[in-house]
Amino acid sequence: MSTSGDSQPYLNDFMMRDDEDGVSGDDESDNKHSGGNYMLREQDRFLPICNIIKIMKVPVPENGKIAKDARECIQECVSEFISFITSEAIERSIAENRKTVNGDDLLYAFANLGFDNYVEPLSMYLHKFRESTKSDRNLYNESNMLQDDSSTEFRKIELP
């Protein structure tokens, strides 16, 4: 099982933490590569707050409210969780000399990091997703074949 310290070199290639290295206020320096680190703006580091709020409102009663600091806390936690899982998946793909992280890498990361309860439902979801995209591709191919057939010209054949 990897610790966050093990994955830090990979994360440093993608983002530099505000709390560790400080941030200058100008946008120009935020996008520059400095010392192996990329400076990311806060909105690039976190999931969009509107998506977080939509999800958080589901269990809250209609007249209930969610405090701004609670929304921001969940936004940071969810974003950090995704980064944590993704960094483990990236490690696996790099170890296998691949440049693409796939669903199986994510399942491996969940299992390797101790989130075993997530592995079975996520693997079922991944299987269903792959089947649905496969059937979507088949429907797309069939509709293209139908269009191709309808666009061909028919010649009149005279029978004796």
Image (tube, helix red, strand yellow):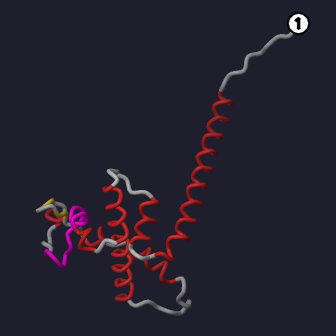
Q: Tag 1's secondary structure? A: loop
Frontmost residue, 81 versus 118 = 118
Q: Which residue is at 35% across, 74% downward?
A: 79
Frontmost residue, 14 versus 9 = 9
Frontmost residue, 125 versus 44 = 125
* Residue 117: x %, y % from top left: 51, 77
How many badges with numbers are in the image? 1
Looking at the image, residue 69 sits to the left or right of residue 14; the answer is: right
Q: Is residue 103 above or below residue 111?
A: above
Looking at the image, residue 128 sits to the left or right of residue 108; the answer is: right
Q: Is residue 110 above or below residue 155?
A: below
Q: Quadrant of the N terminus?
A: bottom left
Q: Is residue 11 magenta?
A: yes
Q: Which residues are magenta?
A: 9-22
Quadrant location of residue 38? bottom left
* Residue 119: x %, y % from top left: 50, 70
Q: Which residue is mark 1?
A: 160
* Residue 43: x %, y % from top left: 30, 71
Q: Is residue 102 magenta?
A: no
Asked if residue 48 shows in the view, the reply is no
Q: Which residue is at 56% across, 55% downward?
A: 130
Looking at the image, residue 109 sits to the left or right of residue 120; the answer is: left
Frontmost residue, 101 versus 33 = 101
Looking at the image, residue 132 sits to the left or right of residue 83; the answer is: right
Q: Quadrant of the C terminus?
A: top right
Q: Which residue is at 60% across, 44% downward?
A: 140
Quadrant location of residue 110? bottom left
Q: Is residue 107 above or below residue 135?
A: below
* Residue 74: x %, y % from top left: 38, 83
